[in-house]
Amino acid sequence: MQFENKEIWLVAGSQHLYGEEALKEVQKNAKKIAEYYSELEDIFLKVKFKGVLTRSSEIKKLIFKANSSTDCVGLICWMHTFSPAKMWITGLKFLQKPMLHLHTQFRREIPWNDIDMDYMNINQSAHGGREFGFINSRMKIKRKVVAGYWQDKDVINEIDTWVRAALAWNDAQEVKIARFGDNMRRVAVTEGDKVEAEMQFGYSVEGYGLKELGKYIQAVPKEAISAQLDKYQEEYSFNRELIDNKKNMKRLEEAARIELGMREFLSAGDFAGFTTTFENLAGLKQLPGLAVQRLMKDGYGFGAEGDWKTAALVRAVKVMGTELAGGTSFMEQYTYHLKADNYKVLGAHMLEVCETIAADTPGLEIHPLDIGGKDDPVRAIFNVPAGSAINCSVMDMGDRFRMLANQVEVVEPEEDLPNLPVARVLWEPKPDFSTAVKAWIYGGGAHHTCFSQAVTLEHIEDFALLADIEFISITEEKNLQDIKNELKWNEAYYKIR
């Protein structure tokens, strides 16, 4: 999760029709916008000005540089003046980086008493941006369009949202997911075409037997385990049953050993995400619980039962949510509260919920786990604070990948949950329980999701656009018939595209 060298490039489009003095003004204004954005804390990455483009050869050269740059995450293109679009064709044919079309003008207001044709010629984004928009639409270029004054808060927020999605997309091109064991037996939705996924998203999925991971776990030295136990004491609350019970402390030591071994394996292999499954624990004394929770906290993507699609999605959303308030976690839509006029969903999993979404300091507890046939595992237990959140999931539909995203409102549990030994979150799906659940099921949505209180629906939609996958949102504004129609229309679209 180190992004200090990543940057966004900003270019301005113009032409020589208006003279050299006009081009100097275009350059000065575009540079000022880039510098302003670069200094803003509200835009996550630095924005670098890369020049005024007036010729086809310049555009092609710039796009080739962007494509080959490991630092460039994406391009912001602004048509300060009219920029004849045919000169963009050769370069845009080779564009491989995300692009945002910023449709703005340098001066906020029309200077009513002073406006003349010189002003009109230079400040004509209204007409230059439409020319640029046409050629992008004609060439079917994926891009985000942001319109408004460049210093307005909503414009800046839209740019930052796209920047974060572009960064997650950039990250995905080098992400590797380690799959410990295989898919949960006979489960359909967690499976998929890994080759197609690498072609579509960029990330790769590599399978490993538990014996290979076990070597790293057994090699963890005793002093490292002791130091890890000290960390646990500092970061979590402990119940007396755990501290005073020698057998439980041995289990905690084993949890520390598993975490340190997994960290070493993932670091050595340069992995950014991983999966486990309770049906394949050969060589492990307990199902990894605390280890998974803590690795997710540090930015790793995770999917249970071999769910590599969700592991990659959790990683992408964690990248998008870097330094934003709120957290992101692997999640499962587990059980319902169906009290009349008070329907809710309880999200949880056997063990693996990321503590970045915890309302308070998690408590470490040890309880039996009936599934998997191993020793009682350690887990961090907590509730999640009330507030807005997103649940999203990616499914392989056979001929394409589909992403579903549902806006939800997290609420506090109506009572304590003293006998539920897992982290959990209670939410009300938007627009209402019946519509949201039906839409999710009609859309083929998975039971595993990526849950986030850090990002918004717009972040998720921007990422889906960059990945060029189907995107269906379930929101306050949509009714079920709208969503069912959208699913039908999409079937036709993806058959003829």
Image: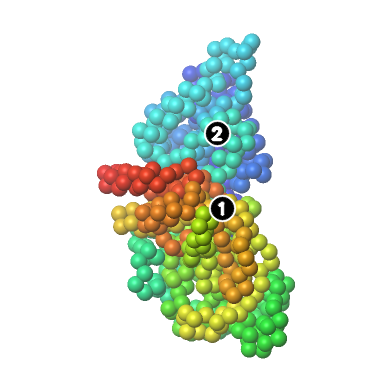
When the figure is inspected, residue 18 is found, relative to residue 49, above or below; the finding is above
Res 10 → quadrant? top right
Residue at 58% across, 80% down: 367
Res 134 → quadrant? top left
- Figure colour scheme: rainbow
Q: In the image, residue 51 lies at what x, y percent?
A: 55, 33
Q: Earlier in the sequence, mark 1 or mark 2?
A: 2
Q: In the image, residue 263 lies at what x, y percent?
A: 57, 72
When the figure is inspected, residue 233 is found, relative to residue 152, above or below; the finding is below
Taking the view exactly as shown, the residue that stands out farthest to the right is: 234
Taking the view exactly as shown, the residue that stands out farthest to the bottom is: 246
57 or 159, nearer to the observer: 159
Residue 51 badge: 2
Residue at 53% across, 32% down: 147
Taking the view exactly as shown, the residue that stands out farthest to the front is: 340
Residue at 57% across, 46% down: 7
